[in-house]
Image (cartoon, rainbow, N blue to C red):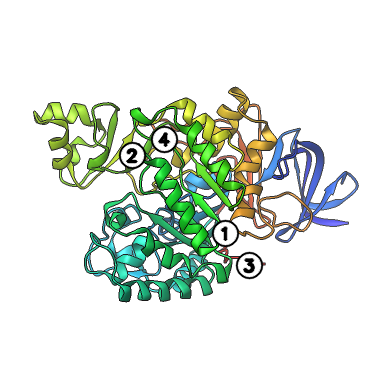
Amino acid sequence: MQFDTVFRNVQVVDGSGSEPYNADVAITGDRIAAIGDLARCESAEIIDGQGKALAPGFIDVHTHDDTNVIRYPDCLPKISQGVTSVIVGNCGISASPTILAGDPPDPMNLLGKQQDFKYPTFASYAEAVMAAQPAVNVAALVGHTTLRNNEMDDLFRAASSEEIAAMKAKLHDAMAQGALGLSSGLAYASAKQAPTEEVMALAEELAEFDGIYTTHMRTEFEQILDAMEEAFTTGKHGKVPVVISHLKCAGAGNWGRTAEVLNLMEKTAKHQDVACDCYPYSASSSTLDLKQVTDEIDIFITWSESHPQHAGKMLKQIADDMNLPLMEAAEQLQPAGAVYHCMDEADVERVLKYRLTMVGSDGLPNDPHPHPRLWGSFPRVLGYYSRERQLFSLGQAIHKMTGMSAKRYCLKDRGEIREGAYADIVMFDPNTIIDVASFENPIAAAKGIDVVMVNGCISYQDGQVSNNRHGRFLHRHQD
């Protein structure tokens, strides 16, 4: 039997949640052709794994790489940590379908500048990704805030029935063109005034296409249980699965409440299809939100358009330098970006371990001083939380990053090592894999990743992205 590539002597962690087993894995074209003892087989390329782990490529279910996969198609922050597929369009903000008349409103400005939003239809965005051929596969949600911005002259109010009808039509078209579903970012000022009924009306467009609803909820602070109930109600109304984005209990007064939060999730899961994602850090990152400014936590300013000289300092330090109260200093810095050290580590572990939790980085690739999650999330789960903290087994850790995610987002034949599945594969050393990116030095490739294969082609090896890129645009339910 002749194969293109054979990985020999590897521990296969297949993405199903099962524990590793020893085998050889053969690739022909873009698919996994055989698994087993392939010592007698012929192959154009043989990679001796020397007992290292072979897993499905990691699926980053929560990214803001919408325009970056086109502008910077090497996707180094992702491919270097073993990610082979990204889901964009989270938190209510997406690069399509949209054309901006002016500067992108907050938080759409996280995705790029006005000239980066040039995809009036979902299909035109998919075509642009395919033309760029990034190093990773890309699948996309449609953002509620993006739809609002297309139709509304003022984002700080509820949409009219005519505006909602226009948003629904655009969403319907995008779903027909292969979008995964709808995302919302109700915590942000640009969507805060949208009543639940506005989002529920949009969710009505999803079931026909077997779509999904994901949400950066209205709050992750004191009223978090109410916000969860709103998300579940929206999904129930639309008859679609719900994913709560980056589930956390934010704010010092909220620490320890993940037990309540996960109890509500578990209770709801008995009669409704619900899940969540989270990133493996106790600090969040976004634009500088005055509602989150407090002296109870450390707030690190990553960029500021009005006072760029203060980027890279703690807000408390900046307030001292400016001789201003904390809130006034924050107002002076706007628009700006921030990292909020707002979570309790025990809460992070509780959510990460929970049976319905997937891993998403929520990295912000355009931030000049990004949160380390952009470069380190997946190796951190494997190295720190699985190997060192023993929060879960290697098989369970990989499942949260691959098979569970592919199934949840209808990425057909991805997320598992089995015959016939796409050959999105990562080979790593389970004894040494670890994140290197830190809050002080956030731009650093992880250790322990040996080979990353995308659609049957080696795309990253020995710390280098290959010259040829092999990512694809993934339409919902696409073969």
Please tell me whether mark 4 sits on a helix, a strand or a loop: loop
Q: Position of residue 265 (x, y in %)?
A: 53, 43
Residue 158 sits above or below residue 267 on the image: below
Q: Is residue 358 visible?
A: no
Question: Looking at the picture, which amino acid does disc 1 mark?
Answer: Gly
Residue reaching furthest to the top: 388
Q: Position of residue 393 (x, y in %)?
A: 67, 31
Residue reaching furthest to the left: 323
Res 382 quadrant in image = top right
Q: Nearer the viewer, mark 1 or mark 4?
A: 4
The answer for how far apart the CA atoms under marks 1 and 4 are is: 35 Å
Residue 374 sits above or below residue 385 on the image: below
Q: Which residue is mark 3?
A: 478
Residue reaching furthest to the right: 40
The answer for how far apart the CA atoms under marks 4 and 3 are is: 36 Å
Q: Position of residue 351 (x, y in %)?
A: 52, 35
Q: Nearer the viewer, mark 4 or mark 2?
A: 4
Q: Nearer the viewer, mark 2 or mark 3?
A: 3
Q: Which residue is mark 2?
A: 369
Report the side of 30 relative to 277 (left or right): right
Query: Which quadrant is home to the C terminus?
Result: bottom right
Question: Looking at the picture, which amino acid does disc 3 mark?
Answer: Gln
Q: Earlier in the sequence, mark 1 or mark 3?
A: 1
- The circle on residue 199 is none
The residue positioned 59% from the left and 47% from the top of the image is: 269
Q: Nearer the viewer, mark 4 or mark 3?
A: 4
For disc 3, the neighbor class at 10 Å (few under 14, some 14 to 19, many from 20) is few
Please tell me whether mark 1 sits on a helix, a strand or a loop: loop
Q: Which residue is mark 4?
A: 249
